[in-house]
Image: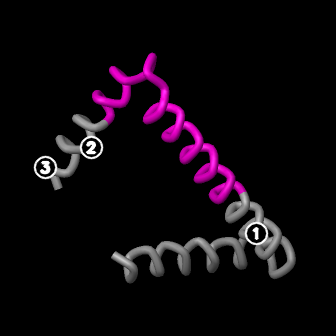
């Protein structure tokens, strides 16, 4: 799995270099990393809300079932 991720990151980096040059490639790649990290924080906050709020317990159970179903399909 790590090798596949590395391949995609390398492909993206090479594309950015070719399309935008060194400085803009660094800027764009850095921005993408920042956005990804912010999305992770938001996702964790939403997950914490869903797990801890009683009024969202039905949603939490549905997500758990979806994860189990998705895991079975891999």
Between discs 3 and 2, the one toward the N terminus: 2
Q: CA distance from mark 2 to mark 1?
A: 31 Å
- Pointer 3 residue: 72
Magenta-colored span? 35-63
Coordinates of residue 55 in the picture (x, y in percent): 45, 16
Give the mark nearer the N terminus: 1 vs 3.
1
Q: Residue at point 13% right, 49% down?
A: 72
Residue drawn at the location 20% of the way across and 51% of the way down? 71
- Mark 2 near mark 1, Cβ–Cβ under 8 Å? no
Q: Residues within 10 Å of mark 2 (few under 14, many from 20)?
A: few
Residue 42 within the segment the image draws in magenta: yes
Give the residue number, with chain letter if any, for mark 1.
Answer: 30
Magenta segment main secondary structure: helix
Give the labeled residue for mark 2.
Answer: 67
N-terminal label among 2 and 1: 1
Secondary structure state at the residue bearing disc 3:
helix
Q: Residues within 10 Å of mark 1 (few under 14, many from 20)?
A: few
Q: Work out which residue is located at the far right of the displayed protein and give it.
A: 23
Q: Nearer the viewer, residue 15 or 55?
A: 55
Residue visible at 28% across and 38% down in the picture: 64
Q: Quadrant of residue 12?
A: bottom right
């Amino acid at each position: 799995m790590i090798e596949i991720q590395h391949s995609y990151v390398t492909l993206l980096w090479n594309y950015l270099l070719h399309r935008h040059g060194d400085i803009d490639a660094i800027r764009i790649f850095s921005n993408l990393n920042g956005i990804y990290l912010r999305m992770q924080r938001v996702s964790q906050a939403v997950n914490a809300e869903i797990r801890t709020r009683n009024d969202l317990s039905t949603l939490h159970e549905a997500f758990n079932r979806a994860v189990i179903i998705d895991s079975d399909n891999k």
